[in-house]
Image (cartoon, rainbow, N blue to C red):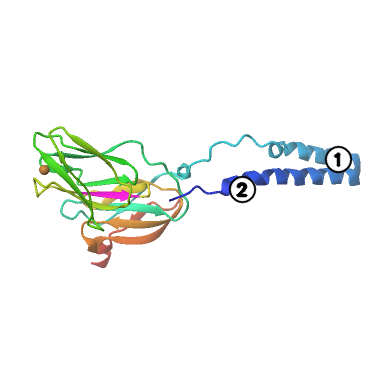
Amino acid sequence: MLKKSGHPARAERARPEWAEAERAAGGHALGVFGLFFGVVFVTVACTETPFEQPAPRTQEQPTTHQNTGVLTGMAPRATGGFPSVVSFAPRFPNDVPVPPDTAVLDQYNTDFHPRVLVVRAGQTVEFKNSEDTLHNVHVVDTATRETAFNVATPVTGSYDYVFETPSTYDVSCGIHPSMAAIIVVTETPYVTVADVKGAFSIARPPFGDYDVAVWNLDPSRRSQRQVAIDAATESLELDVAEDAS
Ligand SMILES: [Cu+2]
């Protein structure tokens, strides 16, 4: 799991040593050069007062404080009505809390809504049935083919589930074979679903290096690459199939 950086704590401990050095320099100079220089160094020492008595440590600023602007780009267009998913996995310690809100995968018009749902690992998903027809929800880990659960969702019924393992999951209804959805469960909070043409937009993640993964229902249109995000990063071309054509 991701952990917070220890760097800010080390910086905090270093401050009193700096203050000691300043005081020592001031005191030595006072003895050698006499009153005039002493006044100068006392003045310097006074300006260092904030270092001698650092303010009480407040909560560490979340990495997301660097979030500025919007990152846009193109991923592969939707395949079979399933849009692409673009995820940015940071290659540095990052600890954004799992959203407390519940994600919803609904059933109506004999279909799942949305077709592609993105959630964080550990986030609760509510499976709903919002129409006057009996459905069920069968969820299978795409990688292992293991069933996560298989439950009936009666009219106006719902079922809550927490996906703990990042993966993609196939969702189907045993009563209506045409119904299908995909749930993408990620460790990273920086994920977005593209539109049917492949265009995506996301609040720009904190500056740093990322593994950028593109999921598409068509495996040949998936990709992964390393991207450095900084103040100049405003758009990304991630449509590998278009690059090759
Ligand atoms: Cu159904």
Residue 184 falls within the magenta-colored stretch: yes
Give 190 or 204, whichever is nearer the viewer.
Answer: 190
Q: Quadrant of the C terminus?
A: bottom left
Q: Residue at x 26, y 67 (%)?
A: 244
Q: Residue furthest bottom?
A: 244
Callout 1 amino acid: Gly
Residue 69: image quadrant is top left
For the question of whether residue 194 can be seen, the reply is: no
Callout 2 amino acid: Arg
Q: Assign a secondary structure to mark 2.
A: helix
Residue 97 falls within the magenta-colored stretch: no
Q: State the separation of the CA atoms marked 2 and 1.
A: 32 Å
Q: Main secondary structure of the magenta part?
A: strand
Q: Residue at x 9, y 33 (%)?
A: 132
Q: Position of residue 101 (x, y in %)?
A: 32, 36
Q: Which residue is mark 1?
A: 38
Q: Which mark is residue 10?
A: 2
Q: Position of residue 83 (x, y in %)?
A: 22, 51
Using the image, determine if residue 136 lies above or below residue 78.
Answer: above
Give 60 or 85, whichever is nearer the viewer.
Answer: 60
Q: Assign a secondary structure to mark 1.
A: helix
Range of the magenta residues? 182-186
- Of the image marks 2 and 1, the number of the one nearer the N terminus: 2
